[in-house]
Image: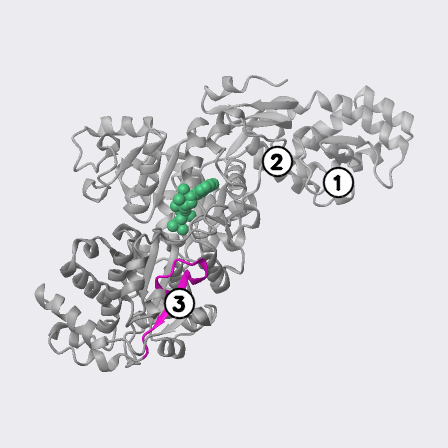
Amino acid sequence: MGPDMSDYRTEPPREVIEPHEAQLLFEETQFLFEDSQPFVEEKNEIFSLETLQRCIITGVLEVKNGKILQLQAPGTDKCTSCLVSGIWEQLEYRVNDIVNIQARLSKESDITKLALEILSSPQSKMCLYSSGLTNSAAEEKVLQFVPKVEKFMRKFVHVDFSIAQWNHKTLAASKGCWEGTISAVKDIEETVMEPKLGLHGKIDVTVEVTKCEGNEDVKNLAAKKLRNIIIGQLETRPIRGGLQIFHTVMPLIAGLNDDQLKAIYNVLFSSDYTVVHGKPGTGKTMFIVVLVQVLVVLNRSVLITSHTHAAVDKILLELQKRNINFLRVGKKSRISENIDSDSISATIEESALTPDDMNRLFKEELVVGSTCLGTRQFLFKDKVFDYCVLDEASQISQLEAIRPLMLCKKFVLVGDTKQLPPLVVSNRAKSLGMSESILERLSKQSGDAVSELNCQYRMNHTIMSLANRFVYDGKLVCGALNECHTFQAPNWSVLEQNAGSSPWLLKVLSTNLEDAVVVVDTGDVSHVDVKVGCIPELRGRLLKTVNLAEAALVYFVVSSLRVVGVKAEEVGVIAPYQHQVGLLKRVFAAKSEYHRSVSVNTIDQYQGQEKSVVVISCTRSSSLNKTVDSNQSSILDDVKRLTVAITRSKHKLIIIGNVQLLTDNFAEMNKLFSVIEENNKLSISNFDWSYMIRKTVKYLENCGC
Ligand SMILES: Nc1ncnc2c1ncn2[C@@H]1O[C@H](COP(=O)(O)OP(=O)(O)OP(=O)(O)O)[C@@H](O)[C@H]1O
């Protein structure tokens, strides 16, 4: 059994290398074998320093499962094996010398001297004699490994951390992984039991390392490592070994599904970072909340961050419900009022605490929440977190992500590359790659590090199938309960009695599972719009991003939802353009408390939200003006935005628009309509537009529009 690890942890800067770091070291040592593959049975074998030294001397070892199987390689004879065994016995006692007496072995000449010393010892002579091998033949064999030993010593034992040393060449050679020096060999071959980490496994050697300390150096190394991750020179690796999560975290993870569990496992046992792709409603928030709880139990510090305050607070509010302490850093006015004010560490300008008090508080808390931009606060200056969790990572640009990622040892990106990307206005910046999110970038290059959440709990089967056909290639599956869910319409009979002039409305509001997705085709409504001369401020926009006829129809549908008894807070209205959202809000504001309580927003503002019933107003009118702003017009051709829009509803999705126009002008809308059942596309050409419009305009006039 090896030494008590906790002893070493309390004596900075020396500490016993953690299992994953040991793994890193051993894997790195494989370069010593690059010229001698025939001697290595399994490419991915973990070689210990001990094994390494044996190989250096003998060059004839075969290794499997960390054990030396035979001291003989193809082409060598029994005599050589005999020599090797003898030499090995002596070497076993010298391994510590090799590492511990660093000064002696910094040069090739010193290493050559030691090897020759061993060869000329009485025991070696005996071996040489009994094997019939000449001195010069044995020397030749041994000395060919000397340059490799020297390389190893330079890289892992005699490391100079001065900044000047970290030029590009050294960095490329080291791949930015190794951030310490081996200062002593503590033990050879031991079983590791580390309940706090949930680790149980075997490592071949325990080495004491001196970590690279000092703020400047740590930050520089972190920056270089992050750079290498982003440019694809460093892939995260799973930590090997017989690992298991101990019973302390079992109650926390009990409610998770298999995908979520696997993702938690990947995070805990990855060497650098993990990417979690969570499709809509697949429990990304739930996953993050449980992950943070697990990390807290394991005494790991976590930075929770995202690009908006709302996204950060969504997670913190869930943690608050579970009595997890945290510190929320940011401007009070931007933080959710539901966050317990004791948890808020406002900006330095706003805080009543002294900087020292704030620093102390900040260092004590394991969990800290802030937006990505908020991490520029002075409080974060010297803080290094064990983990950073980036939520909604598909919306976070690489530039925005760098600051929080620099503050942590490992990170987790959570998001869905099929949903909204970072918002970049400049087309030139887009063409140069600015809109590629950190999630998208790392998803491309890190096969092992990617976990997928496919089991969703939001949409019923019909809406999920639409998302599958439109973008997810059938990968989304239903959690057991939501599959057949539909919305409640307790007053359905009232609608049945009054729908006489609009029979299509019965289908639009039908609670049948097969009618969960419907399209209401308005046809060309331009003739209706042109009559709206009484609202001058709308006139100029009619042909662009406002559609009064559609607003009137949305109003009519929402009013009908009210009639059948759907609660206002269960209804959501989405429009692609701000102007249409503004118009709808004004129409609703003028009507009733019910309408005012219905949430009306753009697609971007709806990401991360869900409603029982969602009505989408596609807005574009028949008089499409090709000269309109290309950014605005492209929203309806943006597969990611459309994906967000159609995956917000749990039970009913009602899409309102001019199908022919949208199909002709927007390829993605065309695709969307093509995957919706024909049976569920309803034409309302006989709709009494003039009545509805008159009514709507009256509301607008009443509210002073
Ligand atoms: N393992 C689970 N078992 C049962 N329900 C779950 C599970 N995980 C998540 N849920 C439920 O699924 C719903 C969606 O979860 P959550 O909000 O975490 O999803 P999300 O992926 O963050 O959604 P979005 O796509 O909006 O970002 C919630 O009601 C949540 O309680």
Mark 2 is surrounded, within 10 Å at the Cα level, by few (under 14), some (14 to 19) or many (20 or more) other residues, namely: some
**Residue in view at x 70 percent, y 27 percent:** 114
Question: Is the C-beta of the residue carrying label 2 under 8 Å from the nearest atom of ligand 1?
Answer: no
Question: Seen in the image, is 329 located left or right of residue 304?
Answer: left
The number of numbered badges drawn on the structure is: 3
Q: CA distance from mark 2 to mark 3?
A: 41 Å
**Could you say where residue 171 lies in the image, as x and y percent from the top left?**
51, 45
Q: CA distance from mark 1 to mark 3?
A: 47 Å
Whichever of callouts 1 and 2 sits on the residue coming sooner in the sequence is: 1
Identify the element where label 1 is drawn.
loop
Camera sees residue 299: no
**Could you say where residue 223 lies in the image, as x and y percent from the top left?**
42, 44
Q: Amino acid at mark 3?
A: Ser
Mark 3 is surrounded, within 10 Å at the Cα level, by few (under 14), some (14 to 19) or many (20 or more) other residues, namely: few
Residue 240 shows which numbered tag? 2
* Magenta segment includes 518: yes
- For disc 3, the marked residue is 431
Q: CA distance from mark 1 to mark 2?
A: 19 Å
Task: Relative to 492, say whether 350 is above or below.
Answer: above
**Could you say where residue 162 lies in the image, as x and y percent from the top left?**
45, 37
- For disc 1, the marked residue is 40
Q: Quadrant of residue 560?
A: bottom left
Identify the element where label 2 is drawn.
loop
**Residue in view at x 33 percent, y 35 percent:** 368
Question: Seen in the image, is 75 located left or right of residue 341?
Answer: right
Point out the stretch of residues depicted in magenta.
Answer: 507-523
Whichever of callouts 2 and 3 sits on the residue coming sooner in the sequence is: 2
Q: Amino acid at mark 1?
A: Val
**Residue in view at x 36 percent, y 29 percent:** 366
Whichever of callouts 1 and 3 sits on the residue coming sooner in the sequence is: 1
